[in-house]
Image (tube, rainbow, N blue to C red):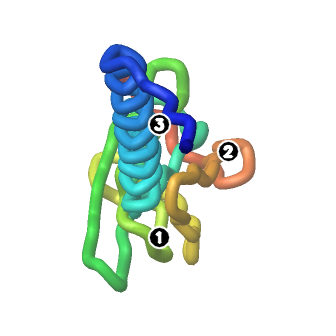
Amino acid sequence: MKSRTLVSPSSRRRGWNLALAIVIGACVAAGSTAVDAQSTTGTVFGKAPTGYAVAVHSNTTGTTRTVHVSSRGRYSIRELPVGVYSVTLENSGNAVAKHLNVPVVVGRGIQVDFDCAKIHCPEVVGKE
């Protein structure tokens, strides 16, 4: 005669709940990884003289963005499509200095600084 082991309904229910929790956990983990993998932007940031603006331009995508330098002498241009950019320091819309061929990489930032001691920036009066 064969021996039979009886499994109580509550044990069976706990087993299904555990299996369901494992499957849901695996799906959530896979979903969060997929979101990170889809990020296709990067950042350009750095130091520049207060009162100026910094512009980025991509010849390949046509993306152009301009930000003003903060009162602390910092700027950051986020969510730029991947590519190669020209980064320009501007005073009243006129180019003062330019960094060419700046690579923007997925999920990373690249620092591009403008040092007036080296590039002889004209003084900006009365601007923030």
User: Which amino acid type is marked by label 3?
Assistant: Tyr
Secondary-structure class at tag 1: strand
Residue 67 vs 44, above or below: the answer is: above
Give the residue furthest to the front.
1
Residue pictured at 36% horizontal, 68% vertical:
57
Q: Which image quarter is the C terminus in?
A: top left
Q: Which residue is mark 1?
A: 86
Q: Quadrant of the N terminus?
A: top right
Q: Of helix, strand and loop, which one carries label 3?
A: strand
Circle 3 residue: 75
Res 18 label: none
Could you tell me if residue 89 is visible in this image?
no
Which residue is outermost to the top? 10
Q: For mark 1, does the 10 Å Cα neighbourhood hold few (<14), some (14 to 19), or many (20 or more) residues?
A: some
Percent of width and height locating residue 4? 50, 34
- Residue 120 on image: x %, y %: 64, 50
Q: Tell me how far mark 2 sits from mark 1, CA to CA.
A: 17 Å
Query: At label 1, which amino acid type do we have?
Result: Ser
Residue at the spot of label 2: 115
* Residue visible at 29% across and 47% down in the picture: 92
At a point 45% along the width and 36% down the height, the residue shown is 22
The residue tagged with tag 2: helix, strand or loop?
Answer: loop
Labels 2 & 1 near each other (Cβ < 8 A)? no
Q: Nearer the viewer, residue 62 or 11?
A: 11
Q: Residue furthest bottom?
A: 60
| Earlier sequence position, callout 3 versus callout 2 | 3
- Give residue 36's position: percent from left, percent from top: 44, 51
- Tell me which label, 2 or 1, sits earlier in the chain: 1
